[in-house]
Amino acid sequence: MNTPPRAKLFAIADIHLSLGTDKPMNIFKGWENHTERLEVGWNSVVSKSDTVVIAGDISWAMSFIQAKADFDFINNRLNGSKIIIKGNHDYWWNTSAKMDSFLMENSFDSIRILHNNAFLVSETAVCGSRGWINDNSQFTMHNAQLSHDVKILQREAGRLEASITDGIENGGKPIVFMHYPPIYAADENPYIIEVLKKYKIKRCYYGHIHSSGRSMAFTGERYGIKFALIAADSVNFTPVLIK
């Protein structure tokens, strides 16, 4: 289990970099010059000794080759250590061994992969998983696609539990970061919620939700857990202080 420096912990999601591929984000309202705004906002609050969790949708790249420019930006232009989680648009994502090799070969030494594990930042265990869609109807309807979704949800819940137990076993107090929201509007992901409740998680941060969808994003307390949206466009492209 890796242990980043003892310092402040921040988080942000959905930075959607596209320096190595043609996927402009400025076609979306509020995303104009978002890479420059991210660098300014990030470095205005994060010091070199701090740690930032990036909760998914990191790069539009389809491969490591395309992703290299984005990771170079993250590693060399943004302060602090970074812990990254898979998002639904991270198509470059691969096995842990291949990703670790990619980071090592390119000297991206400030970036670590969160996948079935946890990282300690002071006494906090940074835990998390990508998660999956949240739609209560999938648990009452029966067809091949819905059955497939349930299997993915169960797998993601298992990965989240593995991450939390790794953090606890190494003496940390877990805080959970996910890409998909465990709660959205009237819908919940029961498998994910069950894991959060089982381990008495007190805080859960998530991304994925943008634009008009933010009005239905759940921010507040339920089941004794405080939930908050940290998608980049919801936090002015500036990481949020967690601890």
Image (spheres, rainbow, N blue to C red):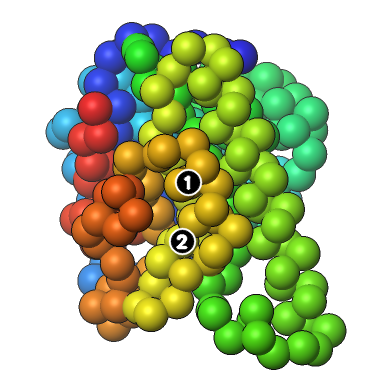
Proximity of marks 2 and 1: CB atoms separated by less than 8 Å: yes
Residue 172, compared with residue 72, is above or below; it is: above
Label 2: which secondary element: loop
| The quadrant where residue 49 appears | top left
Looking at the image, which residue is at 67% across and 43% down? 159
Residue 9: name its quadrant. top left
> Looking at the picture, how far across and down is residue 164, in whole percent?
55, 32
Residue 105 in sight: yes
Quarter of the picture containing the N terminus is: top right
* Image quadrant where one finds the C terminus: top left
Q: Quadrant of residue 44?
A: top left
> Where does label 1 land, which residue?
196
Left or right, residue 211 beside residue 63: left
The residue where tag 2 is placed is 182
Q: Position of residue 25 (x, y in %)?
A: 40, 68
Q: Which residue is at 65% across, 34% downward?
A: 162
129 on left or right of 31: right
Is 10 on the left or on the right of 62, as rendered?
left
